[in-house]
Amino acid sequence: MTLQASLLAYTRPSSTCSHSSLPTPETGGRGFADCAAWACPDRVKPRVRRPSEPDWKRLWRRLETGSGRREWAETREPTRLEGSALGEAAGRLPGIGKPPGPARPGLAWPGGAAGTIALPVLSDIMVDSDVQGVQVKEIIKFTPSLSEQRHKFVLDFVRKHKPQKVADLGCANCKLLWRLKYHECIEVLAGLDIDENMLTRNIYRLHTRAGDYLDPRERPLTITLYHGSVVEKDPRLLGFDLITCIELIEHLEAKELSQFPEVIFGFFSPTTVIISTPNSEFNTLFSGKTLFRHPDHKFEWNRAQFQSWALDAARLYGYSVEFTGLGEPPPGAEAVGFCTQIGVFVKNKPNTVESLHDEKTIECTHTTVGTVIYPSLKEEKYLRKAVSNEVFSQILKMKRVLLERLRTKNDSDNDDELEFVKPECDESKNDPFEETPKPFCIENVFYIPLERLFSFPKIKHLCGDLEMLKMLIADEVTLSSDGSSVMINIINEEDCDLSDSDGDDLRFG
């Protein structure tokens, strides 16, 4: 009995009752007895024949063996991808040999005549680590994963060069954009992908959270996702400092690949472009028989092919390019190079305002999937809230020190002026904090000079000058008559439990 026949025998349903008018399983029924005559003594209850425990054990043992898997694979119909692979065993996908139309002058595809793309044959191709069921010569694991290493490469570049406008073409699940949004130097983030459903499902990664409002960014940040092709010209992607194409070009058809340099380097013309793509030379370490590392790859280049293409594109559009890679080969196989090859393109001459304005007449082609605007300290309402929170925090600390001192000395004379004493700590003699007016207490009112508050580094950084501090907190606290100090009423505060003291016991006015 074949494997499929065994499974069907274990789940074969029973026939229906003689009173039932419903079809039987053999004629397209539901697979169980269903009788309309519920009072009929001949009614057959639904039942399913189940195998004995030893039968099940033998069945699963067959599934675990290679022969059982091969039998199952031989009896089922091949998927669309597998059928395509069987029909293209020559090693090249149809339509990739020569792109339509004349080749661009001076930009010949490596491995053949001008305008052609040479692709690796089946024996030189491996399956990516995400594809399961591939027998390899040896298990090669990258720690961290190649995807993480590629993202880290981009993040390290951003930390070093601090671009303000960054676009990720082929952003897919938006993970790279999610990591980039935490870099304070970036003010504009854009993502572009051909799969609109993928963008819709993953835009949640870019949404604002409660912490973004409690601790706003110093610079504004706007994130926009676009649906469209990377070879379509859209003026909204002009003027970017960095465009990343991580594992993108190998997904392009021949016609799209021929248009790619003109759109990216010629039209978008960013300051820097980072392109990564698989290195087909690394594939020889594996014995997989599938076409490429990913089912959607249209080609995979070796190092010579990628570098030839990159150098020609850089020369044609005024860029310089440097090559590197990620994913080191195992010992003894260093000759194949990195698993992922990377080209970093840097524009030789910066863009001028006139050159960007010339392209604005072109109509927008990409569809906006969503836009997320983050709160920032550039907006007065968020700046006012951030300054007020920091002022309240520092006032609370000073009030606690004052009340502790009052409790320690058990001083009941509230009519005398009481000078606030800062807690002892190791500080330099030229500490500007010590040169500012000290807080003091008159009767039941605690006075904190604005100059004292302004001396705290964070408050000084947020406000810039003393007048700005006064303006931002004027509606949140009570100021003295001359506007030089914040006033707090501390009646009976010396009797309170200091361990329970928090921001709620601050009383202004």
Image: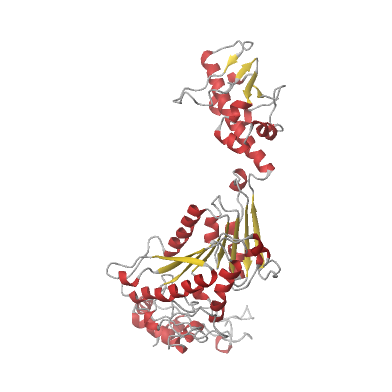
Quadrant into which the C terminus falls:
top right
| Residue 264 vertical position relative to residue 62 in the rendered view, above or below | above
Front residue (pair 501, 242): 242
Residue occupying the far left of the picture? 332
| Residue 425 vertical position relative to residue 297 in the rendered view, above or below | above
Front residue (pair 123, 305): 305
- Residue displayed at 70% across by 27% down: 478
Report how many numbered discs are placed on residues in the image. 0
- Residue displayed at 62% across by 36% down: 464
Q: Position of residue 114 (x, y in %)?
A: 49, 83
Front residue (pair 480, 457): 457
Quick check: can you spot residue 283? yes
What's the coloring here? secondary structure
From the viewer's perspective, tell me whether residue 262 is left or right of residue 61.
right
| Residue 319 vertical position relative to residue 210 in the rendered view, above or below | below
To which quarter of the image does residue 207 belong? Answer: bottom right
Quadrant into which the N terminus falls:
bottom left
Q: Position of residue 300 (x, y in %)?
A: 44, 77
To which quarter of the image does residue 126 belong? Answer: bottom left
Q: Position of residue 41 (x, y in %)?
A: 58, 80
Q: Position of residue 194 (x, y in %)?
A: 59, 72
Front residue (pair 22, 216): 216
Quick check: can you spot residue 77? no
